[in-house]
Image (cartoon, helix red, strand yellow):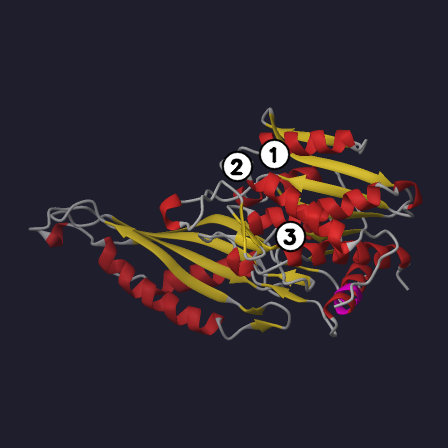
Amino acid sequence: MTHPQPRFGVPPDLARDAARQLLIDLVAIPSHGANEGPILDYLAKRFRRQDIPFRVTEAGGEPLNLTAEIGQGNRAIILNSHVDTVPPGDPALWQTDPLVPTEKGGRIYGRGAEDAKGCLAAMIVAFEALAARREQLPVRVVLMAVGAEERGGLGTKLEVANGFRADAAIVGESTLLEPKLAHKGVLRLEVEVKGKAAHASDPEAGVNAVVAMAPVISALDRLAAEVRTRRERHTGQASLVISTIAGGVALNVIPASCVISIDRRVLPTETEDQAREEIVRTVTAALPTGLGAAVEVRTVRFVAPSATAEGAPIVRAAERAASELLGKPVRASGFTATCDMTYLVNEGSIPSIILGPDSIGLAHQVDECISIDEMTRAVLLYLRTIELWAADQGT
């Protein structure tokens, strides 16, 4: 396939070599467990060699993010991806050492190769190609390599809270090179039914929280079936899942507590309050009366859904660039997971898309890997998207 050559481009063979070697370097630096420092130090040294200005943002006295900026003009676009990964898990389950980058079959294996160091590597190679001709850039391009994405998006949240703003953003997550303009949110709750402990030989002296939880679970399962009928055009179905349960302390004790966890995927057309109140009503109505049991619903975490308007310049630019690259009409759709787009859109009011190489289905798995060819194409896609966005004055 013939790749489009953007004005601020890089030959595909050079893009491939650069992205491949950079990803090997990044995977070789473990960055799980709140350990962003070494990988940010690597990027800082790399940018110093190229005279690319940058700053490091700290949290709690530890480095968390690196932000670099090139170009000039009133308009700015962010390239955002994360340096941290989930833990590698049991190495015995991997075919290769998860912390040693391994190349085979045109792919690079290792923890973080796909989520999201492959996306980050492609963004950096594109950014460095722009930096080589930065005096000709009609817009400002910001590379935002953030930490703690896997720990609640703390890195991006901090940059937005510190007042960083731009006119558009591309979030680097794997999307098979097709832009995503919306994603679901997630509401995680704990429901605790509280009873009264007693000796199992005298059950009437206690209140069995496990028994009282049973009709609550049934009611929530019925609600889950109804929730799954709700759809949004880009992100698909809403969902509700009871994902964990715990109760009791010993075989001969009436359980005084039973706790379940709920994962509720929230559509861009829904709100946290709506989703939570529906669950609270269902739980309260289902709790058996007359037993003496009580119930409490606690919010563990909420990540808001987000969406960017279909006609936004960054959406138009990415759709056109992806259509050229893939040789077929491409329209932006919805993302199956949550990501840092939520903070850029909801807290920063920055029109954003999600875009990157390979499949999100490889994330957090053993034998995580990414295609080198896909990374190469992503470099070209990012460059072409920026070029088209820079030329679009919003008409």
> In this rendering, is residue 144 above or below 321?
above
Indicate which disc residue 392 carries.
none
Residue 276: x %, y % from top left? 49, 58
Q: Which mark is first along the chain, 3 or 1?
A: 1
In space, the residues marked 1 and 2 are separated at their CA atoms by 8 Å
Of the image marks 1 and 2, the number of the one nearer the N terminus = 2
Q: From the viewer's perspective, is residue 305 above or below residue 155?
A: below
Q: Amino acid at mark 1?
A: Ile
Q: Secondary structure at mark 3?
A: helix
Q: Residue at coordinates 56% horizontally, 58% vertically from top-left? A: 360
Q: Residues within 10 Å of mark 3 (few under 14, many from 20)?
A: many
Q: Is residue 361 left or right of residue 388?
A: left
| CB contact under 8 Å: marks 1 and 2 | no
| Circle 1: element type | helix
Task: Say what amino acid the circle numbered 2 marks.
Answer: Pro
Contact? badges 1 and 3 (CB < 8 Å):
no
Q: Position of residue 114 (x, y in %)?
A: 57, 52
Q: Identify the element where label 2 is drawn.
A: loop
